[in-house]
Each structure stands twice: as C-alpha cells, then as structure tokens.
Amino acid sequence: MSKPFFTVYCLIIYAFLLAPIAVVVIASFNAGAFLTFPPQGLSFRWYLVFFNNEVFMRAIRTSLWIAAMTTVISGIIGTMAAMFYVTHAGRLKETVRVAMLAPLLLPEVLTAISLLFFVYSVGLGTQNLVGMIVGHVLITLPFVFINVSASMESYDPAWSLAAQSLGAGRFTRFRRIMLPLIKPGVIGGCLFAFIISFDVFTISFMLKGVGMSTLPIQLFDYLRTNFTPEAAAVSTCSIVLTMAVVIISEKVLGLRIHRF
Amino acid sequence: MTEVSIEKLTKDYGQGPAVNSISIRIAEGEFISLLGPSGCGKTTTLKMIAGFEDATAGAIRFDGRDVVAVPVEKRDIGMVFQNYALFPHMTVEKNLAFGLEMRKTPKDEIRIRIAKVLDMVQLTGYSERYPRQLSGGQQQRVALARALVIEPKILLLDEPLANLDAKLREEMRVFIRDLQRRVGITTVYVTHDQAEAMTMSDRVVVMFGGRIAQIGTPSDIYERPANLEVAEFVGQVNIIRGKVGNRVVSTAFGDVPVSGDFADGAELMLALRPEAVELLPINSGAMGAQAKVLSSYYSGSLVDYRLELAGGVVVNVQTFPRTRFADGEQVLVHAPADRFWPLGSAA
Ligand SMILES: Nc1ncnc2c1ncn2[C@@H]1O[C@H](COP(=O)(O)OP(=O)(O)OP(=O)(O)O)[C@@H](O)[C@H]1O
Ligand SMILES: [Mg+2]
C-alpha cells in the first residue's frame, strides 16, 4: 500500500472507532432535556445532575471498589499462574494454558449462570460482593495471565540463578530481579483487569445482590426509563475515569518496556 | 581460601547416571578444569558443587564441612554463567552491589569494594553503564567481577568464554588466569575446549560419560594420557602399534624401549604427538626411519605433514617450516624414545 493511502486508511479506522465516543462526549454537554445529537446548546447541567444523583454515585463507588479488588486478586493469581506456566509446568504446559484461557472461550452468560448456581450451592449467595468479585477475577484472569506470561518468555532463568548464587533468597529474587523485569506485563495485565472489571455487565448483572448495582447496570437500568443527557455524562465520566487509571499507572509505575 | 573435596558424587536424572561416582580433591587456591565432550556431565558436576542440583549420592565438602544440605544462597559461591546473566535492569554498579547487599555489607564498604573490583577487571569508569551498553568481553568481565566482589569461598565458571570470538577468547583466558592467581581463589572451570583447559589450569579433570578418565596437570594429560580416549581428546595424536619383546616395542619407527609391565608378544599401542617427531632430509646421515611425504599443510608458524612409513603406517607430523619438504619426497623421521607413551594393549 502506498503511504498516503495507508494514512487515510488508518484515519478512517480511527474515526470509525472514536466517532461514537466523541458523539457521547459531545452529547453529554447538551443543554436540552433529551439525548440528541447535535446538542442543543452547551452546558454542564447534566454533570451536576449526575454528581447529585446518589444512586449513580453509589454505583460508581461500588464499581471502583470491585475493580480495585479484582485487579489486586487477579494480578496476584494471574502472575503466579504465569510464573508456574513458564518455569514449572513442564509437560502440563498446554493444559495449563487452555485452562487459564477457558474463561475467554466460554460465553460470558454461561459463566455467569454457572457462577450464580455456584455461589448459591456453596452458601455464599449474592448478598455480599464476594461472589461478584470471584466472577470478575475469573474473567479478568486470562488477561493478566497472557500479559505476564508474554513478558516471562523473555525472562532468562539464569538471572534468578545468578541472584541465588549471590545469596538472594526466594522472595528477594522475585522482588528485586524477576518482578522488575516482568513489570510491564504485570502492569499491562492489571490495567486490563481493572478496565474489564469496571466495564463488565453480564456477570455483574447475574451476581448482584438485591439493591446493589454497578455503574454499567445502573446505566442500563436508567436508560430503560429515561432518555436524558445524564446518561451521556455518566458514560463520559466513566471513559475519563478509565483513561485516568491507564495514564496515571503509566506515569507512576512506568509501563516502559526495558530494552536489552 | 577453601579446599573442596568431592567424594563419590553421583547424579541420576532417571535415565542412568549423568555423573557417576566421581571424586576430586581441589586444593586451596587451585585452578581445576572439568574437560570433556558435550553431555559428559561437566555442567551437572558444577551445578552440584554450586547447589543448583541435588546429588543423588556422594559428598561435597568445603574445608571439610559437608555442604550437600546447604542451599545455593548460603553456600558462598561465585558463579559465572555462559551468557553472563547480568541483571539487565541494573547498572554495572548495582549488579556488583547486589551480592554485597545480600550480605548486609555497609554502604561505604560496598563502594570501596566495587571500586577495587572494577579496577581489577579494568572497567573503572563503567559503573553507570547498563549491561546492554557493554561489549561481550566487557560483560564477561563484569560477570567475573560480580562473582569475585563477594569474596566467595570458591569460583565456578561454566564455559564463560564460549560466546566470545576467537581473539577475545584468548585474551580472556590469560586475563582470567592472572586474576585468579592474584586473588588466589579456589576455582572450578568447565570447558569442552582442550586448549582452554590446558593453558589455564593447575590440573585438568578429563571426563567421559559421567566418569573421570584422568586427573592430572596439563602436561600429564597431554604427554601421559591414561587411555586412548583421553589421548585423542586432548590434541592430535598418532597411534603407533607394535609388538613387545624384551622390554622393547618394535614399530615402524624402529625399536622403542618401554618401561612398565608388558608381557612379551603383547600388541601395544603407543601415543606419539605430531610435534614430537623430527623430520630430516634423507641424505642427512642421521638416525631414523624412512618415510614418504603424502601431503603438507602450511599454516604460517607451522607445517603439518602426512607421512607414510614402512608397512603403510601413516603418521601426522607438525614442524616449524624451517626446511620444507615437497609432496612425494623421501625423508627421515625420528622421535625421541621418551615421547612414545604406552596406552595399553591393543584389543
Ligand atoms: N535437567 C536434566 N534432566 C535430565 N537429564 C539431564 C538434565 N540435565 C542434564 N541432563 C543429562 O545429563 C547429561 C550430562 O549433562 P551436562 O549438562 O552435565 O553435560 P555437559 O558436560 O555440561 O555438556 P555440554 O558441554 O554440552 O554443556 C546429559 O546426558 C544430559 O542429557
Ligand atoms: Mg554444559
């Protein structure tokens, strides 16, 4: 493909991907009473409504809390699984991989229904967030696993051996040698986990307790009966929030890949 | 300084022993090489000394203390890996400091010792570089410095020069040997390169198939090989056959006196190194057997000849190119009696 043509091609794809988001963002500044595009006048009116809407605020807090817990748990389990997979799985390697990726292959509804049966049959129920977080961990785990095991592939086991010969115990070897070198994969995986958990609908919908709600559920619920630009404001905030998480973790933790 | 003694050490991965009941006593400050073909168990032996592999049977003692139950990180060893295994996310200085930090050495002392060891490996001024910013030879020296700066009981190296080009390899041989002498550390060096083992070591351990074929000084190994396998592994060798009679072996070179208990009438193999043979013009009037030049290969400092002696015996000879002989020319060959080394009876 010639260069100008390729540039245009890329621009079209970007436009296709980003235009709907742009529409939502612009619509959220609508001064009118209905969700329309182009907006009738610009204002922050619907943001104020949203920020004063206790139901939405509670849903956002719930979502953030669940996403944070999911990220931590998924990050730890997924990293451990990837370490096992790359260094110790041996003949079981393929089996481990398929098992770890299974949640990606199964339809989410199926996973959600099975989980619902599961949490009730083990007596957990849906009255607390445990079942919900288990579900979120389950579907985000493959992303952590894929990212971490990819960065583990370029990890030379001799680095650990060298550290060991220099007197480093198991924990020090992990913390000072392996973790810094697989960090890009761990952070990338955790970001995926956070964003997916924040966004997931089906699993949350099945496993939510009475009167409990996450942001996507609340938004869906709201849109069934209302059609105000508040929905666009909520969406915009959720986009900004996710992007903020990505950008901040990149700045603070450093996503830069080590070049050898 | 540490004396290392290995007794009846065996490792079996499940398909028969990879290392089979080997015993070595390594003196304080000695440089020992493990030499042998691929798969003979050199690395496995080194890993057991380091503690990376558990021995199936046998003992390893540092200064008389059995270390078999001591984990790697407590064994106080310095290890140099074939691909150096420098930590890529740390500068040279951090790499060198790592082992000292593990030992809770005070900061000031760490700085002093790093400066000293960098000077020793001639890399002063490189402390802020990352490993990827160094050449192969420099990385090699950092790896060496990292292993030495912790002042370990014993230094272990597994084919540390295998990834370097030929010229650098020869430089590093001398460098490592000199450094080891200066520091005086007990060293075990694994290689499959006989020249490397010969030039660097106090003693060489030749291994085949998990067993020790011979332990000795480089000249022992070269001039008095324990058997045919060893003789052929360390450099080129001519095998001269002959019958024993009256303490003399009659060969194509004439009668060669042998010491040792060999029954009269036994067929004996004698090892003769190519450079032990002297070539003289046919009309020089000297003593020697007649031979015909089959071919010659000139390599600058040396010439390799293939010669045919009486009875169709072919030998390789290596000489300085002072006098050149043409292909097909008749020459006199002569080798001192003490350069024939009996390898035992020919089967
Ligand atoms: N982890 C292992 N599991 C099973 N067998 C092994 C293992 N490591 C080594 N072996 C076997 O043990 C034998 C000795 O291997 P070792 O690595 O010690 O050889 P080496 O002398 O270092 O050879 P090279 O010069 O190729 O490095 C080989 O036959 C090898 O296949
Ligand atoms: Mg080896």
Image (spheres, coloured by chain):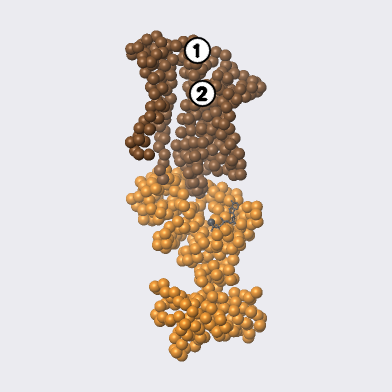
- Residue A148: x and y, percent? 50, 37
- Residue A234: x and y, percent? 43, 17
Is B6 drawn above or below residue B110 in the view shown? below
Mark 1 within 8 Å of ligand 1, using the beta carbon = no
Q: Which mark is residue A249?
A: none
Q: CA distance from mark 1 to mark 2?
A: 18 Å
Q: Which residue is mark 1?
A: A224
Which chain is rendered orange in the image?
B
Q: Residue under mark 2: which chain is it in?
A: A
Secondary structure category for the residue under label 1? helix
Regarding residue A26, the answer to whether it shows in the image is: yes
Q: Which residue is mark 2?
A: A200
Which chain is rendered brown in the image?
A
Regarding residue A167, the answer to whether it shows in the image is: no
Q: Residue under mark 1: which chain is it in?
A: A
In the rendered structure, the answer to whether residue B93 lies left or right of residue A84 reads left
Residue type, numbered disc 2: Val
- Foreground: B269 or A208? A208
In the rendered structure, the answer to whether residue B79 lies left or right of residue A259 reads right
- Residue B92: x and y, percent? 39, 48
Residue type, numbered disc 1: Arg
> Residue extending furthest top?
A33
